[in-house]
Each structure stands twice: as C-alpha cells, then as structure tokens.
Amino acid sequence: MTTSTDTLTVTDNRTGTTYEIPIADGTIRATDLRQIKVDDADFGLMTYDPAFMNTASCRSAITFLDGDAGVLQYRGYPIEQLAGQSNFLEVAYLLLEGELPTQTQLTQWESDIAAELTVDPRVRGVVEGFSKDAHPMTILLAAIAALAPVYPDANDITDPEAQRRQVVRLNAKVATLGAYAYRHNAGQPYIDPKPGLSYAENFLTMIGQESPDPRLVKALDVLLILHADHEQNCSTSAVRSVGSSQVDPYSAAAAGVAALYGPLHGGANEAVLKMLRRIEKAENIPAFIEGVKGGKERLMGFGHRVYKNFDPRATIIKKACDDVFAVTGVNPLLEIAVQLEKVALEDEYFVKRKLYPNVDFYSGLIYEALNIPVEMFTVMFAIGRMPGWTSQWYEMINDKEQKISRPRQVYVGPAKRDYAAVGAR
C-alpha cells in the first residue's frame, strides 16, 4: 500500500501546476505522467527512453539482477548455488514453476521433456531444405517457427494445459533442432535423441560425441544454467513483445532467436575468440591493451550493460574451464585469456571504467573445447535461454495487466504539407 510519503511531487514550470505521482516498487507508472498537460488538447507528458535504458516494461518474479553488487538470482536462488548443485532441467522447472521440484515432480518433468525430444518429420524437412553453408541460427529460427503448424493447440494460449505443453515442447525440441543444425552444416546424418540420457549428455551425443566424459557434460550443463535467463534483455523482450499480440509461443520464441542472432547480443563469445586469435601470443598483450586505450582495438568479453563490478557468471565459467581442459588439454588461447584478464584488471584505465570479464569471455573457450564450431555458439546460447524465454512468455500471457506491446514515439518529421503533382515539384 502506498503511503503519503511514497509519492513524487512534480511541478510543471510551464503551467505552475503541481502533481503527486504514486511510487511503488521504486517506480512510477509512465501513464501517470499523462495527466501533466499544458491544456485539454495536449496529449500529456511522455518519457523518451531510447533502448529502454530506464523503463520497466513488466513486473516479473523470475530473475533478479543487481548489477552494482554482481548478483544474479533465479526465483531468489543465487546462480552460484544453482550452477554448483543443480542441473539444467531442474533450473528450467524452477524458472517456469517458481519453486524447486520435489523428486516426484522432477521425475515427471524429465519424463515430459524426454517424451518431446523427437522432432516431427515435417520440421526435420525444413532443416534439410537449407544449404550446408547456411548459418545454424537461420536454420534454428526457421525450424522453431515451423513447429507452430505442427501443434495447432498452441493457438489456444488461454488454456493452462496447452500453455504447458508448448513450454515442454520448446524446451525439449530446441536441443534436438540445434543438434540437427550442427549435423546439417557438417554434412553428416542426424542422430536421434536418446531419452535415457541427461539433457546435456543427450545434446553432445546428438552432435556425434559418443559417451562424452561426465566432466564435459557437467561443464555444458553449467553453461546452459548460466544462460537460462537474464531479465529483460533484447531477446527476452522480443519474446514478450511478440507474444503480447497473443500469437502462438513458437512464433514468439522464433522472435527471441532472431534477436539473439544479432552480434550485439548472442555473438560476443565468438568475438572474444577472434580477438584472442588476433593477439596470437601473450607477448602481444601490452601492445593490444595500448591499442584499446587508443581506440584502435576493442576489448571483447569485458563490461556489461547491467553488471558494473563483476559478472558472477564469469567466475563460475572460469572454474568450468579448468574442469574441461583437464579432459581435453589446455587450449593455447586460455593462456592469452588469463593473462589479458590479469593485465586489464590491474590497469587503472579499465578499473576506472568498471570493465570486468563477462560471461562471454571464457564461454567460447569451453564450446571450442567441446568441438562446437563458432557458428554454433549462438545456437548454444538459444538452447540455454529457452527456459527463460518460455517462462517469461508464460508469466506474460498470464499477467492480467499486460496488453499488446505498443511503444510511443516522439515525432520529429515535417509538419503537415500538401501533395504536389510530380510536374510541379
């Protein structure tokens, strides 16, 4: 309940009128500003917020971020605990349902996912229709969209049972479709899923790694957990925005894939590998650092839109690197990465700007060690993020306060003018 002090007092200096605007959960409602007008014909005051830097588009109970403190929690559980003690499917259940499952619930959830791993031949045909050099994200985007006509009950978004069926299907089939895209690019026959395996082990098996080392399976599981959700990022916002039109969830999820495909969102770990390869050896790091300071180079994998001190996921991934390389042997790029991190963290230029390693700095090294090509990195991101997308969609579609997404604009074009015939222009 809002008290008399939980308000913002605003005086419009254009009119001298003062307004009391309620504050709840540290926010004011943007529509409350509409009452601030010069006259009755005035539309009312709006906020201008490019890229939604300071605009909350929803109320969500899924993920909590505190960028200044380096905190990431799923449903209140610290990411460090989940990455260290949980597994990906358990985390997916947590994101969707809001609570960790009992053993009975987890067994049923795993059974539900396993039953939906197989992909309909018509959707498989969509994958097969692409050329071998098509980007796997393009393949994944089309294949997820192609699921919609296969499951017509997806259009009944008001039915809770139908909603859950689509969530299960998306979380199951995204791994199979990602593996199909991998094999398609490699010109190799597809490997069908094996329901008896864990989610991560199943994926590695489907891309051709027979009986993968448990340490590699665990490392992939951790990576998927770390990517499972991350508040209202670009792709999650796309899922919510498209889903707000009440389209089927497959189309909404495809929008998430499309947003993630962009290099500013899902391609950062690939950029890190390219940077490390360009540096080539540790002796070249000082010159590279000076190039960054001079604006001639870009330090990829450092800094984050939200985290301003450290990315808690980066610490976890760095530990996972050690476990992976104990199996595969050390990637020579790791030495460069470790030394580059050390130099940057001790340099006042980067410390002052709060540039710290983010989740992408080491994740590419792990994917490469798992023999996953760089073109697949964003697909792996999408597989990990599907529980977040579907949980956010599920929360949005059941939020009575949500309406179809329709941002306002500030019109800066020409004023009204009259049409002139082509000969008179």
Image: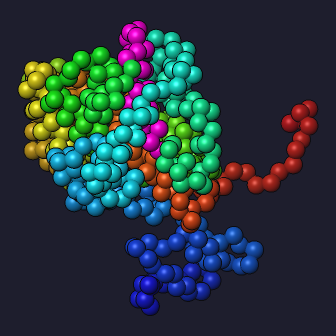
Q: Nearer the viewer, residue 218 or 59?
A: 218
Q: Is residue 259 left or right of residue 71?
A: right
Residue 79 relative to residue 244: left or right: left
| Quadrant of the image occupied by residue 404 | bottom right
**Residue 309 part of the magenta segment:** no
In the image, residue 149 above or below residue 124: below
Quarter of the view holding residue 302: top left
Give coordinates of residue 114: x percent, y percent: 38, 34
Specify start and end residues of the magenta stretch as a single range.
167-191
**Picture residue at 49% right of the left edge, 48% below the top:** 164
Asked if residue 133 shows in the view, the reply is yes
Q: Residue at x 44, y 77 (%)?
A: 24
**Along the line of sight, the residue nearer the viewer: 308 or 207:** 207
Please state the horizontal and vertical placement of residue 325, each as a whole percent of the image: 11, 26
Eyeballing the image, is 14 above or below 324? below
What residue occupies the far bottom of the structure in this picture? Answer: 4
- Of residues 267 and 226, the one nearer the viewer is 226
**Position of 174 relative to 37 (above/below):** above
At horizontal 26% and vertical 51% (from top left) the residue drawn is 103
Quadrant hosting residue 175: top left
Q: Is residue 176 magenta?
A: yes
- Quadrant the C terminus occupies: top right
In screen coordinates, is 277 left or right of 305?
A: left
